[in-house]
Amino acid sequence: TELFPAIQEVLLEFRAGKMHMEGTRVVADPRKGLVRIGRGEEGLVHIQWLDRSSNTIEDDQIVFPEEAVFEKVGQASGRVYILKFQTDDRKCFFWMQEPRADEDEELCKSVNLYLNQPIDFPTEEEENTLGEDISSRAGDLVGPSTGAELISDVSSSGPVKLSDLQRILSNIGPSGEAADPDGGLGLGDILKPELILPLMENLSLEQVASHLPEGQWSPEELMELLQSPPFRQQVDSFTYVLKTGQIDLTQFGVDPSKYKFTVLSFLEALEDSVAKTSEPMQDAEE
């Protein structure tokens, strides 16, 4: 649960279990569940699934306006619904556990309404406070005036769409200037199976086992993990906080004054950090 950002405002909650794909079949998880739609600290809409027995969040996904649709599965005889993303192949299945089935249709409309709300950008006063807070933690990061110009540019023409948000985030850079050429690069562009698989030929799983959940892992299972929606969601979330400066780089052994808040600069910093760590070991061997 600690991996997921806190929900600042709960928009909608309803009881529903989740379902898993097994081949071409969809199998229900028998546990009592809760679907929660809320707005996170960063102002984006999240949809979460919780185990009602333990009150534990197991799934958390950010949904941008016009990115996904929630609808009934026509081929299923029961009260089965699907959250279908239109920007990739993610599909999340749920089975309703609310007592009244005749209210499912109205509930489905409410889900789509909240998932497709315009992004709630902060007011000018909140924005100035946010800008001061970020500046104090991240040095010469984007100033409030630049954020206001970007937001005003898109919000004046109507509801903010996914493409607008991507453009805003891609333009956030040091000192409020346009981002570097690598500013649009995300960790998801690097951690792709087709790029990682060749590395596995020279890297044993034992070398990365300490960074994986407990259990026995094969290269195929690792590739499945890299393609799973929860993993990609966490990678996207980490990319977001990295680019916006909402992270303490010193916890990775990185000096924030020497590197910029871009993925490429972050990877260069890690490479330098590893090189410095390995030098004493090489001297000792010699």
Image: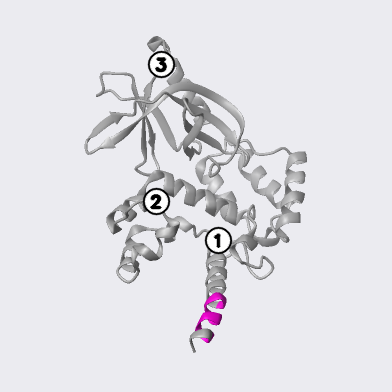
Mark 1 crowd level (few <14, some 14–19, many ≥20, 10 Å Cα): many
In the rendered image, the vertical position of residue 20 relative to residue 105, given as above or below? below
Three-letter code, disc 2: Glu
Is residue 207 visible in this depiction of the protein? yes
Reading the image, the residue beneath label 1 is 183
Mark 3 crowd level (few <14, some 14–19, many ≥20, 10 Å Cα): some
Q: Is residue 64 left or right of residue 39?
A: left
For the residue pair 31 and 186, the one nearer the viewer reads as 31
- Residue 104: numbered disc: 3
Q: What whole-number distance in Å separates the C-alpha atoms at marks 1 and 3?
A: 43 Å
Magenta region, main secondary structure: helix
Which one is in front in this view, the residue at disc 3 or the one at disc 2?
2
192 in magenta: no
Callout 1: SS:
loop
In the rendered image, the vertical position of residue 10 relative to residue 217, given as above or below? above
Taking the view exactly as shown, the residue that stands out farthest to the left is 24
Three-letter code, disc 1: Gly
For the residue pair 255 and 187, the one nearer the viewer reads as 255
Of label 2 and label 1, which has the lower sequence position? Answer: 1
Mark 2 crowd level (few <14, some 14–19, many ≥20, 10 Å Cα): few
Callout 3: SS:
helix
Where residue 3 appears, as percent x and y from the top left, is 53, 45
Of label 3 and label 2, which has the lower sequence position? Answer: 3
Where residue 273 appears, as percent x and y from the top left, is 57, 72
For the residue pair 98 and 104, the one nearer the viewer reads as 98
Taking the view exactly as shown, the residue that stands out farthest to the front is 284
Q: Which residues are magenta?
A: 276-283
- Residue 214: numbered disc: 2
Q: Is residue 212 left or right of residue 142?
A: left
* Residue for point 34% across, 43% down: 89
Is residue 158 visible in this depiction of the protein? no
